[in-house]
Image (tube, rainbow, N blue to C red):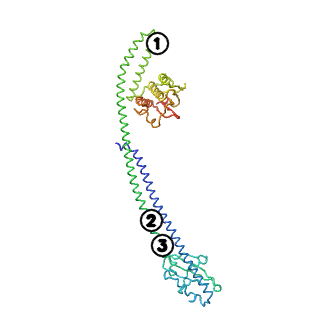
Amino acid sequence: MANALSRPEVTAASQNGGLHASALVWAMIGVVVAVSGVAYWDEERESTAALEDFAQEQATLAKSLAAALQVRLKESKPASLVPSALVEGLGAVERPAALVVLLLPPGEQHFRALDGRAIRSDPIARAIERGETGIRLNREQASGIGLPPRTAVAGLAEVDSGQHGRWRVAVVANAERLRDREQRARWRVVLATLVASGLVLTFGGTALRRQRKELDLERELAIADLQRRRDERLDRADRAATLGTFAMGIAHEISTPLGVISGRAEQLLPAVTGDERSGRAVRTILDQTERIHQVIRAFLGLARGEAPQARDLEPGEIAARALALCEHRFGRAGVSLDADVPESLPSVRGDPNLLEHALINLLLNACDACERGGHVRLAVEGGEAVAFSISDDGVGIASSDAARVTEPFFTTKPSGGGSGLGLAIVSEIAKHHRGVLTIAASPPRGTVARLEIPAAGRAA
């Protein structure tokens, strides 16, 4: 039963917990992606920097060889394009399968390796023509030069030998060391990502388990709170039902002495015929006993769930009777009471005794809320519904209490000051007349109670 009753609140709690868990999961994913992205960016940056350094090394070496070649060209008179004396000693920088030195004499289309091989490399030739100092060669281009089929880097330089023309020098080195560095950097990226992911998943899993425990605890607390409120509602309903039954019995018992009082008063009428004051008093007793009979019958009808006796009523007359019956109470409390009741108001349809009782209850509550010297005002407004507004400048009401004042047995008055049934009865009277009762604070202080009853043309 508790689970069924608590489904909306528990569902809301579960949704909140699911949103928190989803946010945590996405945060974990974001951290892993961020760490991976930073590691990848760092690896790319390191790889680019290493390639630039490697290319700079080859360019420096090419310039050094070009300077040495320039000196030899100026001092020698070569009989051939590349005599052994001209390149003697330059081959010391070569490393088999790792670094090759190429020379391009003036007017030639093919580079000459130091071992005498003729090698054609258009990418290197075009790069030298553009004035570049370095170029990166792919696997096929490196293989054509005689290096292993791996990425290579060439450092480029030119030699102006004067009468011997312009010579080109290229130092082509295999980037195997660079590739190894890149491979190690990639493994570092993978390792860093795995470590970061492991840490994030560990801490995230711990947080998720803790959040799940908190969600389960919140759900249990929500169910317990709903069960408590359900028990309170059942208890109030049981007390209301018991009190209703008891009230019906009391009303039945009161009817007998009221009948006796009414009968004795009727017997007194002939005896006070000549005494106007006494006759007026006896007639007042008869009127009030009849009014009590009508109120008792109306409340018994409400208790049985019967519809009120409906007839067209003038709001001004209802307000006037309620004000007349409350004046003595306001005078004794030292609270002023005034009214704003327009003459042209649409009629309402309902039971006059119940509506009168509802207004009296609201007026007396406003009086009790005021200190001596306070002020209460009754205003009636017309329209599609007739609104009876009772405002006071008393102590006011909290918003949390305003939401509960129509609950049976709830009261803000001190112990012994009220039963907590008055506003509950007024609310029931409003519902039986297809109306509504609202109670709220009235800044800067005080309370306003508003009883709205549909106009007679709209009561259906």
Residue 132: where, in percent of width, then height? 59, 76
Return the disc, 2 or 1, that comes first in the chain's sequence.
2
Q: Is residue 121 left or right of residue 260?
A: right
Decide: is 311 above or below 123. Answer: above
Q: Nearer the viewer, mark 2 or mark 1?
A: 2
Disc 3: CA contacts within 10 A as few (<14), some (14-19) or many (>=20): some
Asked whether residue 401 appears in the rendered view, the answer is yes
| Identity, as a three-letter code, of the amino acid under mark 2 | Ala
Is label 1 in a helix, a strand or a loop?
A: helix
Label of residue 277 in the image? 1
| Disc on the earlier residue, 3 or 1 | 3
| Marks 3 and 1 close (CB-CB < 8 Å) | no
Amino acid type at circle 3 is: Arg
Residue found at the far bottom of this picture: 79
Q: CA distance from mark 2 to mark 3?
A: 16 Å
Figure disc tally: 3
Residue type indicated by callout 1: Arg
Q: Earlier in the sequence, mark 2 or mark 3?
A: 3
Q: Residue tagged by mark 3?
A: 181
Q: CA distance from mark 2 to mark 1?
A: 106 Å
Mark 2 closeness class: few <14, some 14–19, many ≥20 residues within 10 Å: some
Cβ atoms at labels 2 and 1 below 8 Å apart: no
Q: Position of residue 206 (x, y in %)?
A: 39, 56
Q: Which label sits on residue 192?
A: 2
Local secondary structure at mark 3: helix
On-image quarter of the N terminus: top left
Q: Residue furthest top?
A: 274
- Mark 1 is surrounded, within 10 Å at the Cα level, by few (under 14), some (14 to 19) or many (20 or more) other residues, namely few
Numbered tag placed on residue 37 in the rendering: none
* Cα distance in 3D space between marks 3 and 1: 121 Å
